[in-house]
Amino acid sequence: FSPCTQLCPVGASYRTPDGVMLVDDKRCIACGYCVQACPYGSRFIHPVTHVASKCTLCYHRTTKGLLTACVEVCPVKARRIGDMKKPDDPVSKIVSTEDVHVLKPELLTGPHCYYHGMSMEVR
C-alpha cells in the first residue's frame, strides 16, 4: 500500500479494486497527512472543497468505458490508457516489450502509471 493510504486516519484514501488511488471526499477530514505522505507530490488540499484531492484518472469516465480527458484530447497520443490484463492491448504490448519505467520503484507502492523514454534525471 502507498504511504498516503496507510496514514489516512479515517480511511478516506483508498485503492479501488482496479488499482486507482482515490480519496473519499465525504470521509476526508483534511488533516493533510496524505498530502505530506504522498511520495509523488500529487495530493493537495482542494481550495474549494477543503478536502484532500488528486488526479482521479477520470474514474467517473473510465468506469463507463470512456477515456480519461487528458488521453482523449492529447493531439499526439503521448498519453494512453490500456488494460494490462489483456496481452493484445496496445499499452500492454508497450509495457511488456519496450523500455518503460515507473516513478520511485524502490518505494514498492505498485504504481500502474508507466513512462516510456523517461530519463534517469526524472526517475
Image (tube, rainbow, N blue to C red):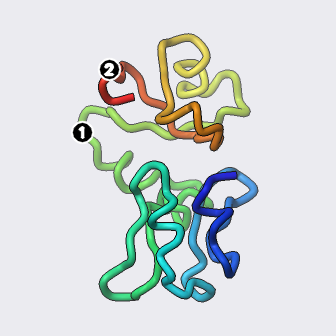
Give the labeled residue for mark 1.
Answer: 75
Question: Please, what is the three-letter code of the amino acid marked with disc 2?
Answer: Ser
Q: Which amino acid type is marked by label 1?
A: Pro
Name the spot of residue 59 as percent of width and height, x first.
55, 62
**Furthest residue in direction left, as rendered:** 75
The quarter holding residue 91 reads top right
Decide: few, some or many residues near mark 1? Use Cα within 10 Å; few <14, some 14-19, many ≥20.
few
- The number of numbered discs placed on residues in the rendered structure image is 2
Q: Mark 2 points at which residue?
A: 119
Which of the 4 image quadrants contains residue 82?
top right
- Horizontally, is 51 left or right of 7 in the view? left
Q: Nearer the viewer, residue 68 or 4?
A: 4
Residue at figure coordinates x 36%, y 79% from the top left? 46
Q: Is mark 1 on a helix, strand or loop?
A: loop
Name the quadrant of the C terminus. top left
Compared to 20, does 122 lie above or below? above
Which residue is rendered at x = 61% and y = 16% of the image? Answer: 96
Q: How far across and how far down the image is residue 29, in percent?
A: 55, 87
Mark 1 vs mark 2: give the one in front. Answer: 2
**Mark closest to the chain's N terminus, 1 or 2:** 1
